[in-house]
Amino acid sequence: MNKDMQYYGQSFPTNIPQEFVPCIISTDQHNHSSPALSADHKECYWSMITFPLGETPQKIYFSRFENGKWNPAQLASFSSDFVDGGPVFSFDNQHLYFYSKRPLDSTSEANTLRVWQVDRTEDGWSVPYLTFGDKFAHIFTSTPSISKSGTFYFTSILDGVKNNMGIYRIRQSKGIFSSPELLPPQINSSHHDWIPFISPDESYLIFSSDRPGSIGDFDLFISFHTEDDQWTKPMNLGPTINSKGSERFPGLTPDGKAFFFVRESEIYWIDSNFIKKLKDDAI
């Protein structure tokens, strides 16, 4: 694989955040997710709200990497007239997960966010369907992130804390999903904790929060997963990444070499080597 292909047509990011594919993926519109990059490095999906805000719902867009460059953004075939966002690829590249406010059927209302998915077919993407099935259709589920073992981490309702938001996980075994588990108080404080990213091996979780120790409105924090299924005290990712504004939507390139995040409404990436340094300090 040549360097341009490996690093998506840009120079590999330094230890200073840089915009990711300016004018095509990181645009002057309101970007609202980390980029979801396919394992073969040829596709990128992300969600965006176009200006003026409030006139059109959040939608999912995509671009293909061809002939050493990214093509202009197009609306994803499965993106609806309702809120769609937060796309995430499966590790085998055959499925794409996202949250949507679309109705369950033609007789229901678009009244809550749920995690949906599409599957690859010979003709493109399949018709969207609920990832967790009808069993959990009544539960608010948003901003999914998935580990290689198939455990989903996501934002849902947590009563009694700021803005009633918290971080949960759902494990699966042979395609059967467990009941949602609320992550412990180290992760879910009395503040606004949301938008999780779980590392592929579940060794760490990065999420957005306005808890004490934040630099701005929302900062990114990291907690490391220990062998006894506990989580270390979350650490602020620091002023290189966090600003006086809001940082959200963490993510990684498929090879794990670069880290994504959204600052206000722009998509940035940075060398991910800082994560190892934080782990050395935490454990």
Image (cartoon, rainbow, N blue to C red):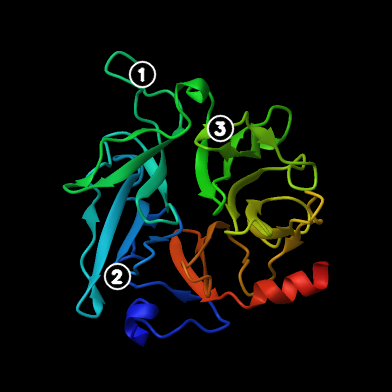
Quadrant, the C terminus:
bottom right
> What's the CA distance linking mark 2 and mark 3?
39 Å
Q: Nearer the viewer, residue 57 or 52?
A: 57
Q: Is residue 193 left or right of residue 264?
A: right
Asked whether residue 87 is in view, the answer is: yes
Q: Residues within 10 Å of mark 1 (few under 14, many from 20)?
A: few
> What's the CA distance linking mark 1 and mark 2?
35 Å
Q: Circle 3 — which element? A: strand
Q: Say whether disc 1 or disc 2 marks the residue closer to the N-terminus.
A: 2
Q: Circle 1 — which element? A: loop
* Residue in view at x 61 percent, y 70 percent: 241
Measuring from the top left, give residue 107's x and y in whole percent: 30, 13
Q: Amino acid at mark 1?
A: Glu
Residue, disc 1: 109
> What's the CA distance linking mark 3 and mark 1?
25 Å
Q: Is residue 80 left or right of residue 252?
A: left
Residue 23, labelled with which disc? 2
Measuring from the top left, give residue 101's x and y in whole percent: 39, 31
Point out the frontmost of discs 2 and 3: 3
Residue 177, labelled with which disc? 3
Q: Amino acid at mark 3?
A: Phe
Q: Nearer the viewer, residue 16 or 99?
A: 99
Q: Say whether disc 3 or disc 1 marks the residue closer to the N-terminus.
A: 1
Quadrant, the N terminus:
bottom left
Q: Say whether disc 2 or disc 3 marks the residue closer to the N-terminus.
A: 2
Asked whether residue 51 is in view, the answer is: no
